Image (spheres, rainbow, N blue to C red):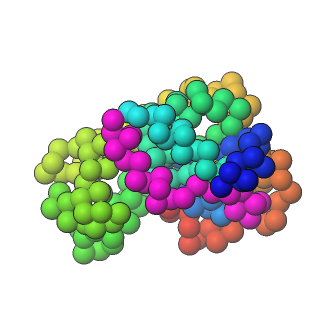
Amino acid sequence: MLAWKTLHANKPKVFCIGRNKTGTTSVELVLKEFGYKMGNQTRGELLLNDYKNKNWEAITNFCQTAQGFQDVPFSWPETWKHLYKKYPNAKFILTYRNDEDWYQSITKFHSKLFADGKRIPTKEDLQKATYRYKGYIWESNMAVYNTPENDPYQKDILIKNYNTHNTEVLAFFNDKKNFLAIDVSENESYNKLCLFLDKKPMHKNFPHLNRTADK
C-alpha cells in the first residue's frame, strides 16, 4: 500500500459523483480499462457511520487508498463538497439520467435485492436485509433520504433529493474545467469521458452498457 501511495501520490484522483443507478458502473469499467486503481467498494460503503456523523475526514482519508472512486459514499449528497475541498485538482464526473427513469430503476433494483422483485421494499424488508450487515440498507436509506418510516421510497422525496443533488453539483462546477456531466446512454458520452480523462478511446461506446448502465 505504501509503495502504491508513493507511486501515485501526484496523479489526479477521479471521483464519479453521480447517484447510484445512473451509469456509475459503466464509468468504473472505463476507469479500470485505463488502469485506474479503484477504491474498495465494501470499505467505502462501510463509511456509512462517518457519513451520518459528518466525519468527512475519514472519507477523504479513505481516498488515499486508490485513484478512482464511485458509488457509496461518493454518490451521496454533500460528500462531493468535501472531496473538492480536499482534492480541488481531482476530476469530477456527474452521471445522470431522467429522474423518473432513475426512480423506477432504483426501486426495481432494490425490490429484487431486498423484497420479492415485484413490490417496493418496506421498512421491515430493509431492516432485515443483510447486505453489509443487518439493517445497513435501512440506515443508509434514512441517512440519505430521511423518508417516512412507513414509506421509505416515497417518490416525491427521492426525486427531489436526486434533482437537488444534480442541480447543486452542476451549479458549483459550472465554470470548472475538471468537471464532466454525462448521460452514459448518449452516443457521444464515452468519447467525452475519454477526452476528459485524456485517454485514447478503446471502444465506440461504453463497454457492456446494456448490462451496467442502470447501476
Q: In this view, does 161 lie above or below 123?
A: above
In the rendered image, residue 164, in percent from the top left (x then y), is placed at 43, 34
In front of the other: 164 or 44? 44
**Residue, far front:** 2
**Residue, far right:** 200
Q: Is residue 129 left or right of residue 63?
A: left
In the rendered image, residue 155, in percent from the top left (x then y), is placed at 29, 48
- Residue at point 58% right, 44% down? 63
> Quadrant location of residue 144?
top left
Q: Quadrant of the N terminus?
A: bottom right
Residues shaded magenta: 31-53
Report the label total: 0
Asked whether the viewer can see residue 22, the reply is no
In front of the other: 18 or 1? 1
> Quadrant location of residue 25?
bottom right
Q: In this view, does 54 lie above or below 2?
A: above
Asked whether the viewer can see residue 37, the reply is yes
- Residue at point 76% right, 60% down? 35
Q: Is residue 188 left or right of residue 49?
A: right
**In the image, residue 46 lies in the stretch drawn in magenta:** yes
In the rendered image, residue 180, in percent from the top left (x then y), is placed at 67, 40
- Residue at point 48% right, 52% down? 44
In the rendered image, residue 88, in percent from the top left (x then y), is placed at 66, 29
Q: Is residue 74 left or right of residue 183?
A: left
In front of the other: 181 or 91? 91
- Residue at point 69% right, 68% down? 207
**Residue, far bottom:** 116
**In the image, residue 50 lies in the stretch drawn in magenta:** yes
